[in-house]
Image: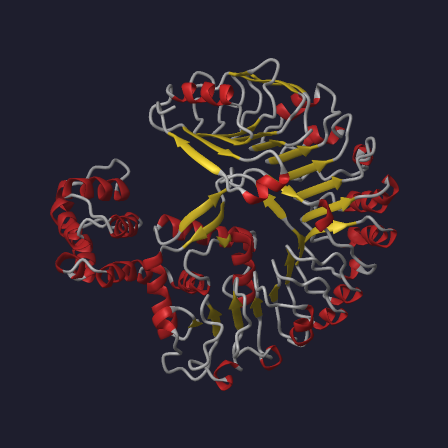
Amino acid sequence: MKRLQMDDSEKLFFKTVFESGKCPNDLLKVSNAILARCNGLPLAIVSIGRMLARRQDKTSAEWQAVRDRLGSELEINPTLEGMRRILSLSYNDLPYHLKACFLYLCAFPEDFEVRRGSLIRRWAAEGLISGRYGHSLEEIAQNYLDEFVSRNIVSPEQIGCSGKIKSCKVHDIMLEVIIAKSVKENFISFLGSSQYNTTAGHDKVRRLSIHPGGTQEKRTFSSKNIVHTRSLTILNSTEKPVLIKFSRLILLRVLDLEGCGWLRNKDLKDICKLSLLRYLSLRNTAISQLPNAVGKLKELVTLDVRETSVVEFPKGITWLQNLNHLLVGGYSYYTRTRSVKHFWWNDGAKVPRGLGNMCALQRISHVDISTEKSSNAMGELGKLRQLTRLCVVNRKEAKLWKPFAKSLDELSNSLRYLMVVDASEKVEELKFLAYLKNPPLSLQSLHLVGRLTRLPGWVSSLSNLASLSLRQTYQLAKDSFEVLAKLPSLVSLKLYDKGYTGRALFEEGWFPQLKQLVVDNLVQLEELSFRGGAPNLERLTLYFPCVPRGGVNGIGKEKLRKLREVEFFGVVIESIFEQVCEAAKEYPNHLKVTREDRPTTTTEAARAPARQVDYNTGSA
């Protein structure tokens, strides 16, 4: 751990604690005493600084008490043990209702990127968070994550353009701290986590997390220990743990088997007998078919079979009247920031009739309606008045959209996220959207894939729309871009392959809130020019298969003052890249230009890793 000199330590500490970056005279002495205990370690300085910044009483006596609690480990012995004591203080300072949620993060292995959505659903299944009047689980959980980040005990990995944390990690040393506390309090027990392969004398294992390397461990736990387990996490393992017999774990509420290469369809026979399950993740496994017996999991709230070979849900799925989240399909990501993603159209799953019985459903993705049976099931969606997120794929004829269109009219008040994919490549198969009687005007996110000659008229009325993506909608009328430009809340615009043709001109007053723009493989794009529009743009992601006839213009401090990052990927055209690097020199120390070169063929791309080069100001 690299240590800072005293001057740099003071600057970091004062900047963390005080908005002005200046310390009052009456706190200088005790500040130096606290910094002496931190011994120049940035993680310790920021952790303690964030904790003190949150306190209303910034008095010498209050800070002296914190200094006394720190001990002198780092001052006289700058070892990991001293660092752990500093971080333990940050944990102990958490309010009671946050401690359990934070401890829960140690269920995930070291360096594991924890996705917000999965974490929220697991917290809820464990009863660690609950909805409050006027606030959804998502909002409450997001507030918790924001609190952890503000205290510097969690680091965000991916942040959306709206500022929401999409994924996070726990620092290695802090992870050791909360693992030790979890073992001591019998909150979570571990296998494969170095010195913490122990129940610490506890007779009953409440939650068990098997980290890499722990699948063959036999000595630590007995069957008697784990029969009371309520939560089991096994991530990215290639071998089935020798101790695990699903049929014996009858008290399980949470079962997360993401990335378990050993999992097979036959294993689901015993899993489907776990009648108390509330959360089941089979994501990224070899599962290809769900048994009808899945319908016996009456308490199930989340079923995640994304990135599997499941292409059809059994009739039994419709018996799950408590299910909130039905997740299937998957995305490929093409950039470091994951700003560019592609849904593989064959990855959706067909659904049976009876979908209308699942009255608790809030999210369904991705449903394949390419058969008459699955299409007809979409006619029951209108009964699901709690449904907020919906992704639908059609690879066949236009008539299969009719039941879905009827249901859309009945969901106009609840839907917040809608993705519609027409993969038939026939002329204007998405035109049914223009004729909706009650369009979903409360949408916050809309994603359209398929041919259109004109945007549905109601799009211009989407006053809350924050995110929009278009793919293969290249027949859109020329005035469509102006319609998008006047959406008052649009924060993210993604124009994918064949998503737009003609000139993309950002005129003065257009796109007032836009923070993220993706221009991906627009073969027929004639020009990209910034003329005073998109004044709040922060991130620009570009892939040009060829130089637009009218060029790329206006990228610079004069037009885009808030731009922080320009990201090139795919086949990078050197002339455009050099042009942007030259413009980056106008920005004082904060415009980042990156590139990820990828081969042009699918075979080469699969074999070759991306090459990334970072350019800071003036280094082009």
Residue 456 versus residue 178 in the image, above or below:
above
Residue 123 versus residue 556 in the image, above or below:
below
Tell me how many marks there are. Answer: 0
Question: Which residue sits at x=57%, y=61%?
Answer: 258
State the colouring used for the structure image.
secondary structure
Image quadrant in which the C terminus is located:
top left
Taking the image as shown, residue 207 lies to the left or right of residue 522, namely left
Furthest-top residue in view?
A: 550
Task: Please state the horizontal and vertical placement of residue 299, each as a whole percent of the image.
Answer: 66, 70
Residue 108 versus residue 276 in the image, above or below:
above
Q: Is residue 71 visible?
A: yes
Q: Nearer the viewer, residue 416 or 567?
A: 567
Question: Which residue sits at x=53%, y=39%?
Answer: 335
Taking the image as shown, residue 83 lies to the left or right of residue 369, namely left
Task: Please state the horizontal and vertical placement of residue 612, each as a whole percent of the image.
Answer: 45, 36
Taking the image as shown, residue 9 lies to the left or right of residue 337, namely left
Q: Nearer the viewer, residue 166 or 424?
A: 424
Furthest-bottom residue in view?
A: 224
Task: Please state the horizontal and vertical placement of residue 11, each as a whole percent of the image.
Answer: 21, 39
Quadrant in the rendering for residue 246: bottom right
